[in-house]
């Protein structure tokens, strides 16, 4: 398939390389030129604008947030000229944006799928993402070879694109909650003479096995926050998305308010570009 790819950040670069490795023809666009040049050197074509990406058979986008998607891609002129059969938006965005995007694409005869992913940049580079996908069955079938190249499993979540974004927002809220819980527990353990590595060993080999505590817990125990696999600023974006979605759904998320304050404190301390695990330093610095 000839695939346009828009957005070559830490996640997008790895995903685009997986599409190339799977034999797809790729045309890429990014605001900054360096990631484009690297992929062109590996065999991708260069798009001069997002519109060039939408002139392919299908287009995948991996942008930072609602504003980036709306500013770059949600335009009548761009979609009216598009020849792509489907646009697969793999960013973590709000349900409201997903609904607006689906309606706008439909008016111009372009399919729209929401397909946010679970996994950090190293997982993307290995083609081992979990993909949460929602949209029409025909669009999902068309995008299936792309999902197979980029991920280890695709979870179909119905025909409403916004459902995939809600599921991703819920998952990221739980993930960030787990990191905050481990951060606070680590601060308590260390204050009582228990090394963070010992707590990590106990927790991950008993009640909380799995990648969240073992992965983020190791970063916390080692105070290793750079380079960031997932920036703390993006964690704040995702928790804010959870709170906004909860308000629109008349659901209370009291712990999300606590999380947002922790994230804001960490950013105020200059950690916006550190890994999300740097929440631990805010917990360590708190005094009763």
Image (spheres, grey):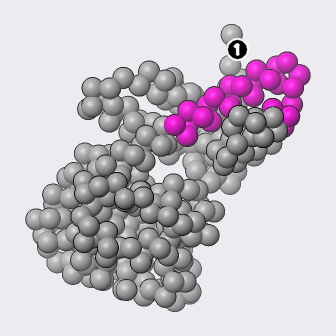
The x and y percentages for residue 34 are 54, 74
The verdict on residue 190 being magenta is yes
Q: Which residue is nearer to you in this view: 204 or 27? A: 204
Q: Which residue is nearer to you in this view: 104 or 173? A: 173
The x and y percentages for residue 174 are 52, 37
Give the vertical position of 108 relative to 178 (above or below).
below
Q: Residue furthest front?
A: 206
Span shown in magenta = 174-200
Q: Residue at x 29, y 46 (%)?
A: 95
Residue matched to label 1: 287
Crowd rating for badge 1 (residues with CA inside 10 Å; few <14, some 14–19, many 20+): few
The x and y percentages for residue 121 are 59, 61
Q: Residue furthest top?
A: 288
Give the vertical position of 206 relative to 234 (above or below).
above
Q: Main secondary structure of the magenta part?
A: helix
Q: The C terminus appears in which quarter of the rendering?
A: top right
Q: Residue at x 82, y 24 (%)?
A: 190
Per the image, label 1 sits on a secondary structure element best described as loop
Q: Residue at x 16, y 60 (%)?
A: 104
């Amino acid at each position: 398939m000839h695939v346009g790819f828009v957005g070559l950040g830490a996640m997008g670069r790895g995903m685009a390389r997986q599409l190339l490795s799977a034999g797809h023809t790729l045309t890429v666009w990014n605001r900054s030129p360096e990631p484009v040049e690297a992929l062109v050197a590996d065999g991708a074509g260069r798009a001069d604008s997002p519109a060039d990406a939408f002139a392919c058979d299908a287009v995948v986008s991996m942008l930072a947030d609602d504003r980036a998607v709306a500013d770059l891609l949600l335009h009548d002129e761009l979609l009216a000229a598009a020849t792509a059969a489907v646009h697969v938006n793999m960013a973590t965005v709000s349900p409201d944006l997903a609904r607006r995007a689906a309606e706008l694409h439909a008016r111009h005869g372009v399919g729209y799928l929401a397909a946010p992913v679970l996994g950090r940049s190293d997982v993307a580079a290995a083609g081992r993402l979990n993909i949460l996908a929602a949209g029409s069955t025909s669009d999902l079938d068309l995008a299936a070879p792309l999902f197979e190249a980029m991920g280890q499993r695709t979870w179909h979540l119905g025909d409403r694109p916004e459902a995939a974004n809600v599921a991703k927002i819920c998952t990221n809220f739980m993930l960030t909650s787990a990191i905050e819980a481990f951060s606070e527990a680590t601060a308590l353990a260390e204050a009582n003479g228990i090394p963070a590595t010992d707590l990590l060993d106990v927790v991950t080999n008993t009640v909380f096995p799995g990648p969240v505590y073992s992965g983020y817990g190791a970063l916390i125990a080692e105070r290793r926050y750079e380079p960031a696999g997932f920036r703390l600023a993006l964690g704040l974006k995702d928790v804010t998305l959870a709170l906004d979605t909860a308000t629109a759904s008349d659901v209370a998320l009291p712990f999300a308010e606590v999380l947002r304050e922790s994230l804001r404190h960490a950013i105020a301390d200059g950690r916006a570009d550190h890994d999300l695990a740097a929440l631990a330093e805010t917990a360590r610095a708190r005094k009763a």
